[in-house]
Image: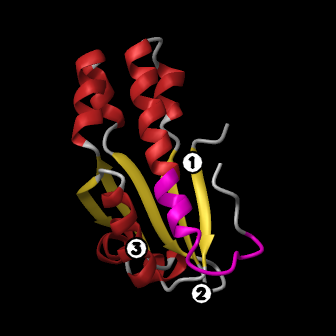
C-alpha cells in the first residue's frame, strides 16, 4: 500500500528543503515541526548511524483550516497530524527526494464524509506543492511521477 507521494529533484539538499518550505507555504501549509533526523541519529546513535542515513529532515506541515475541520469531524485524527513531508539526499548525492504523506491515508482509517473532504483538499494541496518542485529542472530517471 502506497502512503506517500514522492518526487526526485535535481536540487541540492539545502535548496530542496528551502523550496519545499516555500511550496508548502504557497499551498497554505506552515511548518509546525522540523526534525533533523541526521542530527538526532548522530546525537543518540553515533556518527556512523547518521553517516549511513545521510541528510534527512521531516517537516511537520499544517494547514490550520484543514486541521480544524479534520479535528472537528474526528478529534482522534490529531494522531495523524501534522502532514509529514520528508526531504532527504538521494543515493547519488546529486538529487534530493521529497516525500509527502498521502492524505488519503486518513480516509482509509475513517468513514466520515467530512474527513474525506479534508483529505481530498489536503492531498490536492500536497500534490500541487510537489508538482511545483518537480519543475525545478530535468527529471531524474528514478523519479516517480507525483502520484
Residue 14: quarter of image:
bottom left
Q: Is residue 27 left or right of residue 135?
A: left
Q: Earlier in the sequence, mark 1 or mark 2?
A: 1
CA distance for labels 2 and 3: 18 Å
Residue 98 position, x and y percent, is 52, 65
User: Disc 1 on helix, strand or loop?
Assistant: strand
Q: Tags 2 and 3 in contact by the CB under 8 Å rule?
A: no
**To which residue does mark 1 refer?**
4
**To which residue does mark 2 refer?**
93
Q: Is residue 68 left or right of residue 138?
A: left
Residue 44: quarter of image:
bottom left
Residue 31 position, x and y percent, is 25, 58
Using the image, determine if residue 41 lies above or below residue 48: above
Which residue is nearer to you in this view: 67 or 86?
67
Residue 3 position, x and y percent, is 58, 42
The residue mark sitting in front, 2 or 3, is 3
Find the magenta span and give its range. 128-142
Check residue 19 in the rendering and tell me which mark sits there, or answer none.
Answer: 3
Count residues near mark 2 (Cα–Cα under 10 Å), then give few for <14, some for 14-19, many for 20+: some
User: Disc 2 on helix, strand or loop?
Assistant: loop
Using the image, determine if residue 114 lies above or below residue 98: above
Q: Earlier in the sequence, mark 1 or mark 3?
A: 1
- How many marks on residues? 3
CA distance for labels 1 and 2: 22 Å
Q: Residue at (44%, 46%) from the top-left corner?
A: 125
Q: Residue at (27%, 31%) from the top-left corner?
A: 78
Q: Earlier in the sequence, mark 2 or mark 3?
A: 3
Q: Is residue 38 left or right of residue 67?
A: right
In the picture, the quarter occupied by the N terminus is top right
Amino acid at each position: 500500500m502506497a502512503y506517500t507521494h514522492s518526487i526526485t529533484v535535481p536540487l541540492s539538499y539545502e535548496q530542496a528543503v528551502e523550496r519545499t518550505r516555500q511550496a508548502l507555504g504557497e499551498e497554505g501549509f506552515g511548518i509546525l515541526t522540523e526534525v533533523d533526523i541526521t542530527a538526532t541519529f548522530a546525537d543518540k546513535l553515533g556518527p556512523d548511524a547518521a553517516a549511513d542515513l545521510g541528510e534527512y529532515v521531516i517537516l511537520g506541515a499544517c494547514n490550520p483550516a484543514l486541521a480544524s475541520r479534520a479535528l472537528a469531524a474526528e478529534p482522534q485524527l490529531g494522531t495523524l497530524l501534522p502532514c509529514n513531508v520528508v526531504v532527504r539526499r538521494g543515493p547519488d548525492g546529486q538529487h534530493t527526494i521529497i516525500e509527502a504523506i498521502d492524505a488519503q491515508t486518513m480516509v482509509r482509517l475513517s468513514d466520515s464524509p467530512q474527513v474525506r473532504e479534508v483529505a481530498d483538499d489536503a492531498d490536492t494541496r500536497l500534490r500541487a506543492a510537489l508538482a511545483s518542485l518537480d519543475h525545478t529542472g530535468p527529471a531524474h530517471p528514478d523519479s516517480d511521477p507525483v502520484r
